[in-house]
Image: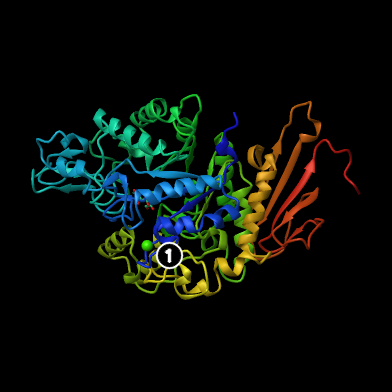
Amino acid sequence: MEKWWHDAVVYQIYPRSFADSNGDGIGDIPGIIARLDYLKNLGINLIWLSPVYRSPDADNGYDISDYRDIDPRYGTMADMDALIAEAKKRDIRIVMDLVINHTSDEHEWFRQSRDPKSPYRDYYIWRPEKNGGPPNNWTSFFGGDCWKKDERSGEYYLHLFAEKQPDLNYDNPRVLEEIKDIMRFWLDKGIGGFRCDVINLIHKTSLVDGKKRLVLTGSEHYISQEGTHEILRTLRKDVLSHYDCFTVGETVFVTPQMGRDLTDEKRGELDMIFSFEHMETDQFFVKWFRRKFSPARFARSIATWQNALEWNALYLENHDQPRSVSRFGNDGMWWSQSAKLLCTLLLTLRGTPFIYQGEEIGMTNFDFTSMEQLQDVESHNIYRMAKKLCIPASYRWKMMQRTSRDNARTPMQWTAKAHAGFTTGTPWLGVNANHQRINVDSQKDDSQSILSYYRTMIALRASLPVLRTGSFHAVKMTKSLFIYERQLSGQPSEQSSDEKIRVLLNFSPRNAKAEGNGDVLLSSYGNQRTTYDGILRPWEALLLRSSETEPEKKR
Ligand code: ISL
Ligand code: CA
């Protein structure tokens, strides 16, 4: 069944790096409001806002100390209400980040929870020591073990992420009631839904030792457990189904089968998920060990997921990933062409596309030159851990350069001026020096720019149902080509609606032969191309349209 979010294009805002309105160097909500016309003009209709809740900021807001308050860095609740209202005026809805696997250790529940006699004790996962050490052998997403001893009771609490992010205990029904209330609080304000942070980890089936692994020992006890499925169904039934909204789950280590279970409409859990497999095709085992990018491997993974799920959340970037043009494209000589190719890919697959801020102007990885320039808690933890493991300094540095989450977190590049027009003060994280070349200002009126191409692709998708809901069919996946078709099968009565679009992507800096016929609907090389001669140019993306019911093709 058709859902309104099937027609949406989403734009992810990482608030601290988007636009600073008051010169303190940190992006904020009034800064976002001032840029809503820019987003409207781009053509998006939903904003996923990374967390703006009150937070001590140990993980840039993914450690929440009050779910019903806005962090003063970002503004006030009045600012937030204004953002929702101003966005609505422009037919844009806001999706909030729902971070409920853990809270901050400064959340009132956790403060109380440190007292073993408190009714809040059981809101978190506390266990006594075992053999003079942590309760089990599990390890954390951010490196090291995931238990922290609290001096007050001598017991340990579980944290799958940073120490300052204690995991909530979903065996306690009161926790879920609290979460429901928080969700209602935001839905009552008229938001369009939630992006649910690491949602497939929330229920831990048991706390016994895990099978020893290089990373995430213990994960078999909490990834996509039946308890989590049950919680999701309860949230849908008791809360979400009473509102006009949708959910996208960030689901780590999911298999296609888990993905199907999580999004099966009949089960009533999530509306779509962010899966990770395509983002892992350029790594060995963990993201810190990068493997040469292979378009074929990448394409095969995308095709698998296109075919596996009824509906996908589509993305090539977010605040945790390196920049796509530096990773899957070419941020040197073919910067503009390869960014347009990636845009074409993102906007012609079946699902709801998510654009991450700066992706639409081809922002690249961070040009930092020392560890002091990085802020991310994960980068510093991993760097320290790699040092302990005697990984040589030059390799450690390479790991950070390619993979640090700060690659995607540098301030949005609005202008060629000081600090890229992001702030009048000192930005919280360095601005990439290439802002003089790569910025919104220089692209907004240039019809050949990456930004203009995004606008065109978003509008094209909006005008062609086949690009949104047509079926997906992979045609070719080689070391430089990814070719697929989207097809709409119309009702027998509407004969002309049988429509097929072939998407041809050349992931290489050379001309490439590729089969296809039909009219050129769009080329990333612009209008210069109206007919297709069977040769794709370097990094070219091409859309060919053919109508099955058309008689013979013109010769
Ligand atoms: O970047 C990662 C670590 O290697 C990812 O595995 C990431 O930690 C994972 O996708 C979960 O991410 C989400 O939850 C984290 C937060 O730090 C991320 O920013 C968020 O997107 C904890 O809340
Ligand atoms: Ca600010």
Colouring mode (rainbow / by chain / secondary structure / one colour): rainbow
Q: Residue at x 48, y 58 (%)?
A: 34
Q: Is residue 354 above or below residue 435?
A: above
Q: Residue at x 23, y 36 (%)?
A: 207
Screen quadrant of the N terminus:
top right
* Front position in the image: 362 or 295: 362
Q: Residue at x 75, y 49 (%)?
A: 544
Q: In the drawing, does residue 160 fall left or right of residue 408?
A: left
Q: Is mark 1 within 8 Å of ligand 1?
A: no
Residue at numbered disc 1: 410
- The 10 Å Cα crowd at callout 1, few under 14, some 14 to 19, many 20 or more, is many
At label 1, which amino acid type do we have?
Thr
**Residue 499 occupies which quadrant of the picture?**
top right
Q: What kind of element bears circle 1?
A: loop
Residue 281, how many percent across, how many down? Answer: 50, 52
Q: Residue at x 61, y 64 (%)?
A: 444
**Residue 411 occupies which quadrant of the picture?**
bottom left
Residue 103 visible within the image = yes
Residue 479 visible within the image = no
Residue 370, how many percent across, how many down? Answer: 35, 73
* Front position in the image: 505 or 29: 29
* Front position in the image: 23 or 78: 78
Residue 492, how many percent across, how many down? Answer: 78, 26
Residue 266, how many percent across, how many down? Answer: 50, 24
Q: In the drawing, does residue 102 fall left or right of residue 359?
A: left
Q: In the drawing, does residue 148 fall left or right of residue 252?
A: left
